């Protein structure tokens, strides 16, 4: 937010979980947004995710590298148009490694061979319930980048969806990384604040770009 009295400071939210405000500068945000718009187009584009119980997620999603669906991964958009998932770009892998090195240090970054991106789009009414990112075989840190509207990000514990948790305000350009003892912490988005995106970004709503390491065998 321009003109605020005190700059937002980097914070250790939990062991292995770091919030880095404003980590991605304005040109970086625009580049990532342009890429997200390309990835959202068919084939294997932005879709509504349906849960096994018949419900739907309010945040819409597109995947890179591996296609996530509740609660597994595939190489095709099995719950969408059935086409091959879009490739995971090398520049995005390097961005993820740089994010981990900057927050958790060079050691965790060395093992962070990112090959999955889940891009979630939230309009003003979208939410994300408390969940764990537990469908991967790797315990490499999760990297989360925010674009557009501010949200309340709820970061909990590894045992239960209930308290204790911390509510963190994530704005456009913010980075949140969680690994180590917090890698399987429950987390969610209880609220998005419509109309809070930077005016120059040209985005209505919130995009969250989440990078993960699958740990799956390489395709042959």
Image: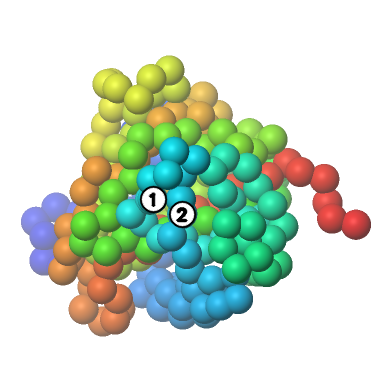
In front: 162, or 82? 82
Query: Residue 217 location in percent, x, y?
Result: 82, 45
Q: Which disc is residue 70 wearing?
A: none
Q: Quadrant of the C terminus?
A: bottom right
Q: Which residue is mark 1?
A: 56
In front: 32, or 203? 203
Which callout, 1 or 2, points at the residue further toward the start of the chain? 2
Q: Which structural element holds mark 1?
A: loop
| Residue 109 seen from this side | no
Q: Residue at x 41, y 78 (%)?
A: 30
Position of 10 compared to 77: left or right? left
**Vertical order, 152 against 16 (above or below):** below
| Residue 36 seen from this side | yes
Residue that lies at the very extreme toward the right in this rendered image: 220
Could you classify mark 2 by the number of other residues whose Cα lies within 10 Å: few (under 14), some (14-19), or many (20 or more)?
Answer: some
Position of 214 compared to 158: left or right? right
Q: Which structural element holds mark 2?
A: loop
Could you classify mark 1 by the number of other residues whose Cα lies within 10 Å: few (under 14), some (14-19), or many (20 or more)?
Answer: few
Position of 217 compared to 61: left or right? right
Q: Residue at x 48, y 68 (%)?
A: 46
Q: Which residue is mark 2?
A: 49
Q: Are marks 1 and 2 in contact (CB under 8 Å)?
A: yes
């Amino acid at each position: 937010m321009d003109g605020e009295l005190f700059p937002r400071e980097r914070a250790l939210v939990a062991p292995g979980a770091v919030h880095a405000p404003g980590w991605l500068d304005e040109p970086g945000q625009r580049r990532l947004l342009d890429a997200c718009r390309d990835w959202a187009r068919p084939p294997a584009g932005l879709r509504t995710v349906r849960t096994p119980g018949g419900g739907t997620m309010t945040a819409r999603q597109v995947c890179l590298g591996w296609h996530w669906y509740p609660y597994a991964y595939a190489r095709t958009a099995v719950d969408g148009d059935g086409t091959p998932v879009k490739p995971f770009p090398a520049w995005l892998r390097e961005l993820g490694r740089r994010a981990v090195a900057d927050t958790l240090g060079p050691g965790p970054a060395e093992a962070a061979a990112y090959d999955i991106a889940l891009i979630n789009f939230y309009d003003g009414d979208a939410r994300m319930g408390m969940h764990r990112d537990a469908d991967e075989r790797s315990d490499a840190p999760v990297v989360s980048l925010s674009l557009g509207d501010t949200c309340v990000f709820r970061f909990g514990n590894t045992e239960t969806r209930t308290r204790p948790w911390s509510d963190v305000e994530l704005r456009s350009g913010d980075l949140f990384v969680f690994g180590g003892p917090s890698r399987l912490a429950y987390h969610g988005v209880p609220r998005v604040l419509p109309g809070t995106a930077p005016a120059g970004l040209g985005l209505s709503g919130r995009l969250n770009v989440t990078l993960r390491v699958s740990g799956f065998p390489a395709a042959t």
